[in-house]
Each structure stands twice: as C-alpha cells, then as structure tokens.
C-alpha cells in the first residue's frame, strides 16, 4: 500500500467522531492492507514504530521537526515557524506549505518505505545524530505529497491525533474477520498476554483468530493487567465471586 493511500484513511478517521464509524474504517483498512505491512500500519495507528514495551524515542521536539520541514522546501525557518504558530499544528502547516508548491513532484512512497525511513531517524544516535535526524526527516518530507507529509511529521512529535484507543483497534481487527466485534474478547485476551498490536494484527491477517490461541507470554515482555469491573453493591460482588 502507498503511504498516500494510508494518509487518506487517516484523514477520514480524523474527520469523524463516531467510534462505530472509525471501527468500520479501520476494518476496511485492515482488509485492504497486505499481511506484510499490517504490523507497520498498526504501530502507526498508535503513533509508534514498535510495541508499547519497546522504548524507541525519536528525540525530536517540535522545533527540530519544524526545522526539518522548513529545510525540506528551502523555506526560511522563521516564516515556517510563523505558519506553525498560526495553524497550531505542524501537520496542517506543512500540508499548506507544500500545497503552495503547485509544480512540485513527489515520490510514490510505500508504507514500508516510510516506516523504514522513520525507524532510521529514530535509531540515529551518537555524534551528529541530531543533524542526521534533521536531514533524513527533511528528505522524507520533501519526497511526500502534502497529505502524507501532514501525518508523517506528526509521528515524531507524538501528535497523530486520530482520536481512538487501542480497544477500537482491536474492534477493527474483529470487524476485519466477522463484520462485528464478536471476536473482541479473544483478541483482547491475546493482547493482554502479549501487548504487541503489530504482532496480533499480523497473526490474525495470516492465520485468522485461530492463530491467537497460541499466543503466550514472552520473557521480559510485560503483560497488561485486566481492568476491574465496578460493581454497585456487596451482594453483586459476592455473586460475582461465586460464578
């Protein structure tokens, strides 16, 4: 899948507030995406490049991302910073700035290519790493179309702003298979045992819900604790214990 196609899904999701509609869009996305890329898309939906238990920090604040964006189309940093301030969102600012360049050409970036390049940026360390991050991100922004760039620049600053929880993603995975959330309980159980949304989604895409029956805890990977259900009386608690 091209990242431009993924960006259209992101935009549709951003434009609606209904959780049910979002779940339907996620389901459509999961059906369309190939098994080789669904894990990457799922991490993007969390605004990450890997599972929650992996610490992979971009080390880029909004100022550095703004500098990369300005560099990507040779704008003065001051002018672009002003645009970011006006928009209140670096994604909207870069989208508008790129739309002004009517004759610009862009590469047909794939989801995997964008993921790989962002991963390289996040893993850059040592002497000169900040300059390397800036250059790599500027090149990626330059290659991306306006809508893709809008969402790409939000990822390093943790501002993807799609407005749903991991549980909605799990519902979307259930809808992908059955058209409803009937599998949510089984998917959630596997996710609590191994909280790697990419692995869970890829396993379902390749093996169906049956593949999750073999999910087991891994050494040094924390499990997620189930949230307690609130009951309204002591009698309800006693009845629950006796079930």
Image (cartoon, rainbow, N blue to C red):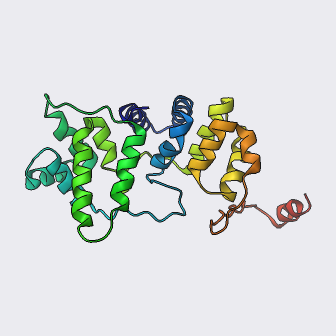
Q: Is residue 123 above or below residue 147?
A: below
Residue located 51% across and 63% down the image: 54
Looking at the image, which residue sits at the far right?
A: 242
| In front of the other: 114 or 186 | 114
Looking at the image, which residue sits at the far front?
A: 127
Q: Position of residue 197 (x, y in %)?
A: 58, 50
Q: Is residue 132 above or below residue 21?
A: below
Residue located 38% across and 36% down the image: 110
Q: Is residue 229 left or right of 89 when viewed as pictured?
A: right
Q: Quadrant of the N terminus?
A: top left
Q: Position of residue 87 (x, y in %)?
A: 21, 47
Q: Position of residue 163 (x, y in %)?
A: 45, 47
Q: Quadrant of the C terminus?
A: bottom right
Whether residue 157 is visible here, answered yes or no, is no
Q: Is residue 72 above or below residue 225?
A: above
Number of numbered discs on residues: 0
Q: Is residue 102 left or right of 23 when viewed as pictured?
A: left
Q: Is residue 61 above or below residue 146?
A: below
| In front of the other: 124 or 5 | 124
Residue located 59% across and 38% down the image: 172
Q: Position of residue 127 (x, y in %)?
A: 25, 71
Residue located 62% across and 39% down the image: 173
Among the 4 quarters of the image, the one containing residue 12: top left
Whether residue 87 is visible here, answered yes or no, is yes
| In front of the other: 79 or 52 | 52
């Amino acid at each position: 899948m091209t990242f431009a196609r993924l960006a259209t899904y992101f935009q549709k999701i951003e434009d609606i507030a209904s959780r049910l509609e979002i779940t339907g869009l996620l389901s459509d996305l999961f059906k369309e995406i190939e098994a080789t890329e669904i894990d990457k898309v799922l991490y993007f939906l969390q605004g990450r490049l890997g599972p929650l238990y992996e610490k992979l920090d971009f080390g880029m604040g909004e100022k550095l991302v703004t500098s990369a964006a300005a560099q990507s189309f040779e704008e003065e940093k001051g002018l672009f910073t002003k645009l970011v301030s006006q928009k209140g969102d670096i994604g909207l600012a870069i989208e508008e700035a790129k739309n002004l360049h009517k004759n610009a050409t862009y590469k047909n970036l794939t989801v995997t290519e964008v993921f790989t390049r962002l991963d390289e940026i996040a893993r850059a360390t040592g002497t000169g790493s900040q300059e390397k991050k800036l250059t790599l991100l500027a090149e990626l922004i330059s290659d991306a179309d306006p809508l893709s760039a809008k969402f790409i620049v939000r990822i390093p600053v943790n501002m993807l702003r799609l407005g749903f929880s991991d549980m909605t993603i799990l519902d979307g995975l259930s809808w992908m298979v059955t058209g409803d959330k009937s599998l949510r309980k089984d998917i959630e159980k596997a996710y609590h045992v191994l909280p790697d949304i990419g692995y869970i989604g890829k396993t379902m895409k390749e093996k169906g819900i049956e593949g999750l029956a073999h999910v087991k805890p891994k050494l040094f990977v924390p499990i997620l604790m189930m949230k307690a259900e609130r009951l309204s009386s002591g009698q309800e608690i006693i009845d629950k214990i006796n079930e």
